[in-house]
Amino acid sequence: MKKYFEFEKLGTSYRQEIIGGLTTFLAMAYILVVNPLMLSLDSVADLPEAMRMDKGAVFVATALAAAVGSLVMGIIARYPIGLAPGMGLNAFFAYTVVLTYGIPWQTALTGVLFSGLIFIILSLTGIREIIINAIPAQLKYAVGAGIGLFITFLGFQNAGIIVADPATLVTLGDLSQGPTLLAIFGLVLTVIMMVRKVKGAIFYGMIATTIVGMFAGLINIPGQVIGKIPSVAPTFGVAFEPIFNDPASLFTVPFLIVVITFLFVDFFDTAGTLVAVANQAGLMKDNKLPRAGKALLSDSIATVTGAVFGTSTTTSYIESTAGVAAGARTGFAAVVTGLLFLLALFFSPLLMVITPHVTAPALVIVGVLMVSTLGNIEWKQFEIAVPAFLTIIAMPLTYSIATGIAMGFIFYPITMILSGRRKEVHPIMYGMWFIFLAYFIFVKK
């Protein structure tokens, strides 16, 4: 075991790797609570039940996808990186694909499945490098920041801090309401712990907020701590149903946009996470990432697995840097993280009582972390600033990640051509221009 994971070469030990794996799990365990609430559209009232995914099934699917993804990453790629359904991608799945487009969640899962299969092909053929190089870094940064703003907006909504207003579209909510005060308490507490660099601050913040909510009578007290694992039957294998029962639904522009968006965001989120974690752990060699193909393949396998179980796109988590900071250097830490997600399956009674007001601070904090990419954008170059800004601002204002990406990809070739920099635009970007123009013509009517 030590030889396979190269403990001696990387100067680590079982104790160090176990602590690192546990730290990574605590840093990303919030997804076990957030994902079921997100995909079930729990914060949206008066929806037909057919539009909501079963929370218990999504909880199990989330844990299993995270477990399989982390184990595969640890064993095959041997990186200390945990995987789970991605924040931002789950918001796109629930609020854009299902709520805005009206695409059934069953078909949306098929989109996740297709994006995962395409990702596997791209990882095995080497086309991945071509596409990564074709899309400018400035737009990659903008997409990450835009998703951060969108997630933060969702968090404020779920907390009741931001509410709808007929005159101004949105306004400040009633901060005297108990659930909103609970969310504010959770946000302040989590910020304090983040500033103090407490490992697993987001997870601990949710636990503390839940306990306070129980004492305040705002959250139901669970009848038991350990319980029977919920059934995954409502979501397991559902991704295959549209393929056999309604194949026509898969040959539409909205479905194509869904697949491309899932693929795009996961594609670059994974690449960015791999580089960030490898750099922090000192695993980069000559500015190159060893076993990059295996790491990307692991991520794509996790996405396909998650889609089969019944959850949105599974991706590598930047929270893995917390585990690296605690000493993780090898894939053994990811194996530990994966096993802990399996263990978490037995604690569903504790997790299922948590409300959107408790998870709202997590969304806000994750948003803060994601908008850090704003500093990498060359704002003084107007031809870059315009598409980047439109990408970022359109996501929260249109309530759609896909729309933000589309606006940025449409304006980028235009501004670059007009500024005399057309030779810097890769031919693939022109292809993207036509695809996203079709998105506005045929989807956004």
Image: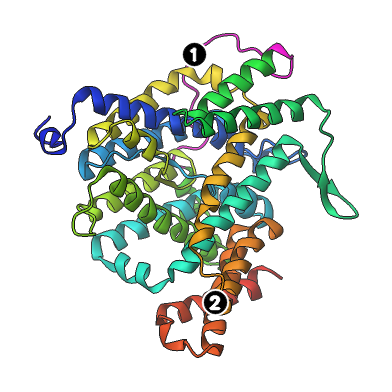
Residue 218: in magenta span? yes
Position above or below: 347 against 44: above
Residue topped by disc 1 = 227
Tell me which amino acid carries mark 2: Gln
* Residue extending furthest toward the left: 3
Q: Residue at the spot x=34%, y=48% of the render? A: 299
Task: Give the labeled residue for mark 2.
Answer: 381
The percent coordinates of residue 368 (x first, y second) are 57, 46
Which portion, as a residue range, is magenta? Answer: 215-237
Q: Nearer the viewer, residue 420 or 80?
A: 420
Give x and y (percent) for residue 77.
22, 45
Secondary structure at badge 1 equals loop
Which quarter of the image is occupied by the C terminus?
Answer: bottom right
Give the image quarter of residue 168.
bottom right
Q: Is 37 on the left-hand or right-hand side of 318? A: right
Image side of residue 169 versus residue 256, left or right? right
Mark 2 residue element = loop
Residue 8 pos. (x, y %):
11, 33
